[in-house]
Amino acid sequence: MHNELVFASATELARWIRRRDLSSLEVVGACLDRIAAVNPALNAVVQLDAEAALARAQAADAAAARGDWWGPLHGVPCTVKDWIETNDLVCTAGYARRIGYVPPHDATVVARMRAAGAVVLGKTNAVSGNEVYGLTQNPYHLGHSPAGSSSGEAAIIAAGGSPVGLGSDSGGSIRQPAHNCGIAGIKPTTGRVPLTGHYPRINVMNDPRTVIGPMARTVEDLALVLPIIQGMDWRDASVVPMPLGDWRAVDVAGLRVAFYTDAAEGAPPDAVVGTVRAAAQALAAAGCTVAEKAPPMLKYSYPITRDYWNRPEPESWEVWDAGEETTLTSLAVEQHLFLWDRFRRALIAFMETVDVILTPAAQLPARPHDDNPGHIAYTLTYSLVGYPAAVVRCGTAADGMPIGVQVVARPWRDDVALAAAGVLERALGGWQRAGLAV
């Protein structure tokens, strides 16, 4: 029964708990047992309070017995990337200077998950490795990287330790780990989800790329969580009170789809190209109009991002402290903003006649830790413009590693990205337990 529980979706678990087929205590206990079994090999969960999680589950069950339902995630366990603050768990963000630091407040998204009834199991490792917790391993091949800064979140979800969690994404840090670990994830439209309580400190004036979003084994679970965490919190001034459409109401037939595979520094292997083409064919079979074409100016994605990385950033939200010295002149910064704006204008013009873009999620499937596991050329583009972009597993490499496809939609059409990703999941299989090394 434990195996059935730990690989069930959050949507299924919520339904079973509400029907009283299962207790939250059973579900949380099963996830904690699974974490105990796999985490020594993965190093994905870096802070865990099993006693508090079990107490919260007991409280959820007691509330259910009274007919008091907390929300759509009543009694459902989740995990949280260590860059997203929790007021009851250490949040180092992988930095030695923050060892032992427990934030005074939950991040807005964590508070919203708890208010919806979720049980927070623990915090997950940030970046493939860091000075505090070391490397996280890929559950399909120990020794390979999950990649991206939401690496621990993807690894423990893929391995069955948590059904759903929260990650963050600047250039691909939800989408890259989702691809490498064979799960689903979405980078929402910039401005949909508050960043309050994210560390490093992010605001849209200095970084319109970074967003917080859900990660799960199924697209349905992404769609379950996104409405819970979105919307204004009256703290993050970048959030727009934009309604989120129902992904189930999207008429996929008739969507105009563009796809491309050649935008990386090196050509993707045949398995990656073939997976994207299979995804394009699946959308065509669903009634979409599909054409192989790429947006303009893709070659500028890396240069614009590199120039951004060269700009100084303060750690504080209230006090300017740029940290390291910079040689950038004001002219260089202005030129960077000009080129970035030109890039954004070119992309939005392309989207006038396109509803969905399909690309590889990465140039390569997961690689060993020492073999440049990033390969983020495909994801960088849509961070720079802030469009919603989901990743779902659509194929498998010859060595058994998952291959994800990136599904990009127009700004604020997160529902379209989820709907198209759902079609691909149903047609091409989505997350698969087969081949897990743990």
Image (cartoon, grey):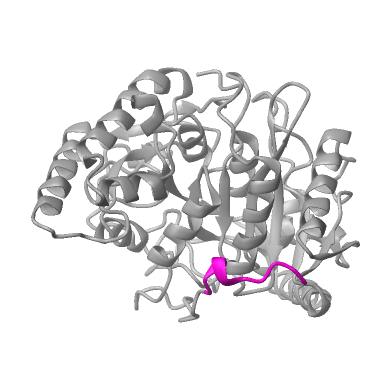
Q: Which residue is drawn at 48% across and 29% down?
A: 159
| Location of residue 150 in the rendering, given as x and y in whole percent from the top left corner | 52, 43
Q: Is residue 297 left or right of residue 201?
A: right
Occupied quadrant, residue 403: top right
| Location of residue 163 in the rendering, given as x and y in whole percent from the top left corner | 41, 41
Q: Which residue is drawn at 74% across and 66% down?
A: 356
Occupied quadrant, residue 22: top left
Q: Main secondary structure of the magenta part?
A: loop
Q: What stretch is highlighted in magenta?
A: 245-254
Residue nearer the viewer, 280 or 142: 280
* Magenta run includes residue 238: no
Q: Is residue 425 above or below residue 104?
A: above
* Magenta run includes residue 248: yes
Q: Is residue 366 above or below residue 58?
A: above
Q: Which residue is drawn at 71% across and 74% down?
A: 337
Position of the N terminus by quadrant: top left
